[in-house]
Amino acid sequence: MGAAGRDFHDFNVLFRDDPSKEVVAFTATQIPGIECRDYPAELAGPLYPDGIKVYPEGELGRLIGKLKADEVIFAYSDVSHEHVMHAASEVLAAGADFRLAGPRATMLKSPRPVIAICAVRTGAGKSPAARRLAEDLRGKGLRVVVMRHPMPYGNLLRQRVQRFASLKDLDAQDTTIEEREDYEPHIRNGFTVFSGVDYAEILRAAAREADVILWDGGNNDFSFLRPDVLVTIADAYRPGHELLFHPGEVNFRMADIILINKVERGNATGVARIEENARRVNPVAKVIRARLEPSIEKPGAVRGKRVLAIEDGPTVTHGGMRFGAAYVVAKKYGARELVDPRPHAAGSLRETFAKYRHLRNVLPAVGYSEAQVRDLKTTIDAIDCDLILSGTPTDLSRIIKMGKPFYQVCYSLEPVGKETLEGAVWEALTQRGVLQGMGKASRERG
């Protein structure tokens, strides 16, 4: 059971070369348009000359009976513990066993040191943390390569191993808005990003270019690589979620460093709750604090205006957040009104708003397919506003022609208190002797 990422990875490392097991199907959910295709034979290996079919998750109960499945493996992320157990109950009622594959069985051993940035929920602020850490490591003379959690929503064979070193690479490989949101900021900062389907091959390619690999996780999944240091981001706006969602709680319990993000005046109670949960379930983790600082190039342009706030899609949909960086900037700089996009939603966006009823005055940048991008453009064009603020990390104006003044919202991770993320990570690396002498050697090479 998957969503085009963890499911394929677990198959590759656990079953692809095991003749004692036969994988009879994948099911897919969460991401529109990824079901009703095949995991191709070229990726599935010689034991599967016809490939493996992918079905909608709604057919799970029927498939267990039809295909005589003995075991079902749950392999996707950012879902409540209740959701996982409902899935387990459906599987058990159909007569099969239910399994969660863990880190020891699925993490790959890297020939290069690995720092993993994971989270308790999607939208907690992994990417700005990863960007800050990547820049610090580069400043210490290290070659840093970013490895991203998979988002293979297109041609799986073409996406077997993906390398993105320029914005042109994003265009050439037909990346979705969701992929661009995570890859583009790293690329703009001068880092190469690897992603794809077959992570054993991806790791070999990335290791050839790196002194250290930075795993930038997806949703709240745990790393595909065995980390030397694991940083888990908790969200001060969603206290308690660190113990309520799968597999975010796994990351929270395994973390070497817990970074409580989005710390602001007014959420001290939430911060204290996260700290107490950390002391209770992971007392050896180092706990530090940070906040996200949003900004735009011309803040004065916002005052008194009617604003359309476009936000990172996963954060405000299955991530459950009611707002993001664009909303915060609009409020901060005195927007007269945040326009409600729901009456103007076109096509698939109508379905998105119907499913995620917590959304009000923000427009999720959903663009997993060309049709969804067209729906997004149609919706934007139909909305009467003075200007557009985009809180998604990708530059939407490169994909969609905007008919109104458009401002990109940027945000950076800023420490709260004396402890910094990079300081805590470097301390952990030094204590473990992971990068001893490597910075100097890299500088001499370069």
Image (cartoon, rainbow, N blue to C red):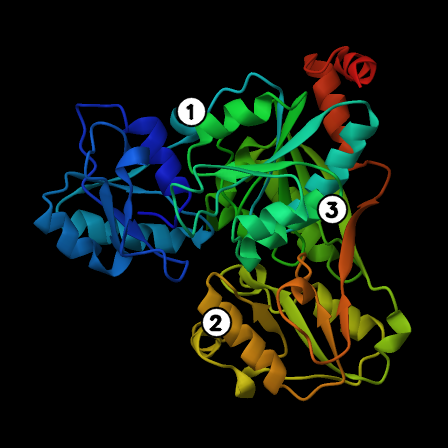
Q: Tell me the amino acid under the disc marked 3.
A: Arg
x, y percentage for residue 127?
A: 66, 46
Task: Tell me if 319 is positioned left or right of 303 in this view.
Answer: left
Q: Which mark is residue 58?
A: none
Q: Earlier in the sequence, mark 1 or mark 2?
A: 1
x, y percentage for residue 382?
A: 60, 86
Q: Say if residue 226 shows up in the picture.
A: no
Neighbor class of circle 2 (other Cα within 10 Å; few <14, some 14-19, many 20+) is some
Query: Circle 2 is placed at which residue position?
Result: 356
Task: Tell me if 298 is positioned left or right of 359 in this view.
Answer: right
x, y percentage for residue 245?
A: 47, 50
The residue drawn where x is 45% and y is 70% is 371
Q: Tell me the amino acid under the disc marked 2.
A: Tyr
3 vs 1, front mark = 3
Q: Earlier in the sequence, mark 3 or mark 1?
A: 1
The residue drawn where x is 56% and y is 49% is 172
Question: Mark 1 and mark 2: span between their CA atoms?
Answer: 35 Å
Q: Which mark is residue 188?
A: 3
Query: Circle 1 is placed at which residue position?
Result: 104
Circle 1: element type: helix
2 vs 3, front mark = 3
Give the residue furthest to the right. Answer: 300
Q: Tell me the amino acid under the disc marked 1.
A: Arg
Residue 264, quarter of the rendered image:
bottom right
Relative to 431, residue 155 above or below: below
